[in-house]
Amino acid sequence: MKFIGKFIIFILIISCSNKQITLEKYSNYPVKFAKQKIKYPNNDFSIFIPKNWEWKVETYETESIILGIDAVSELDKDGFVDIISIQKLKSLEENKDLKAEFEYFLNLMENNPQNGKLIESGYTEILNKKSYFFHTKSDTGRYGESEIISFILDSGIEGVFYNLTASASQTTDLKKNMSILIQSLKTFEIQNKK
């Protein structure tokens, strides 16, 4: 009987330690880091990213992506990087509202499991704006593969949305690194154009 009790406790400990961290937990995890403010060259948006990260304006070969940037961390001790990506894009399905755009992408993710395991998704105001999010991760079990949280926000232009993505490597520093990425995305601000 003692063996069964110890076995049950062992199973409970294992199952609790493998529990997936949610977006809410990442966003509330206290982490401090040095920041730098960057602005898109045409003043479309601004964001604070971790200091000393490299960032660049991206060019795209598709008309659906209007503009975007990628910001990348330095290599960690195991050779992995974390990435923040921001894109302003036209709806591929000509959706005019945010919820319809979210449902379109959710359907794509649910029907393409090779893109990773969908952990959670839904409506959120974590960025201090109405938005929807997707939280996915590679589930191959290989050390360092990506865990991704993406947000879709209104741009203020009908049928045009922002896609903000945080991609962190599944390493021993995942919780801290993803929390830094989410804290950075929370500083995203659409600039008032005059």
Image (cartoon, helix red, strand yellow):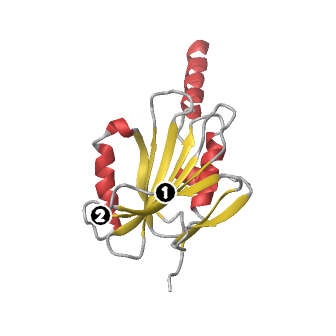
Percent coordinates x, y for residue 175 in the rendering: 62, 43
* Of pointers 2 and 1, the one earlier in the residue sequence: 1
Residue at 51% in and 39% down: 146
Above/below status of 191 relative to 82: below
The crowding category of the residue bearing disc 1, from other C-alpha atoms within 10 Å (few below 14, some 14 to 19, many at least 20), is few
Q: CA distance from mark 2 to mark 1?
A: 26 Å
Contact? badges 2 and 1 (CB < 8 Å)? no
- Closer to the camera in the image, 9 or 152: 152
Q: Which residue is mark 2?
A: 100
Residue at 33% in and 46% down: 109
Q: Quadrant of residue 90?
A: bottom left
- Left or right of 33? Residue 69 is left
- Left or right of 146? Residue 181 is right
Residue 131 - label: none
Label 2 vs label 1, nearer the camera: 1
Q: Which residue is mark 1?
A: 58
Percent coordinates x, y for residue 134 in the rendering: 43, 51
Above/below status of 70 relative to 98: above
Q: Quadrant of residue 10?
A: top right
- Left or right of 41? Residue 150 is left
In terms of secondary structure, where does tag 1 sit?
loop
- Closer to the camera in the image, 41 or 192: 41
Percent coordinates x, y for residue 69 in the rendering: 52, 58
Amino acid, disc 1: Glu
- Left or right of 69? Residue 116 is left
Quadrant of the drawing holding the N terminus: top right
Q: State the residue lying farthest toward the left.
A: 93
In terms of secondary structure, where does tag 2 sit?
helix
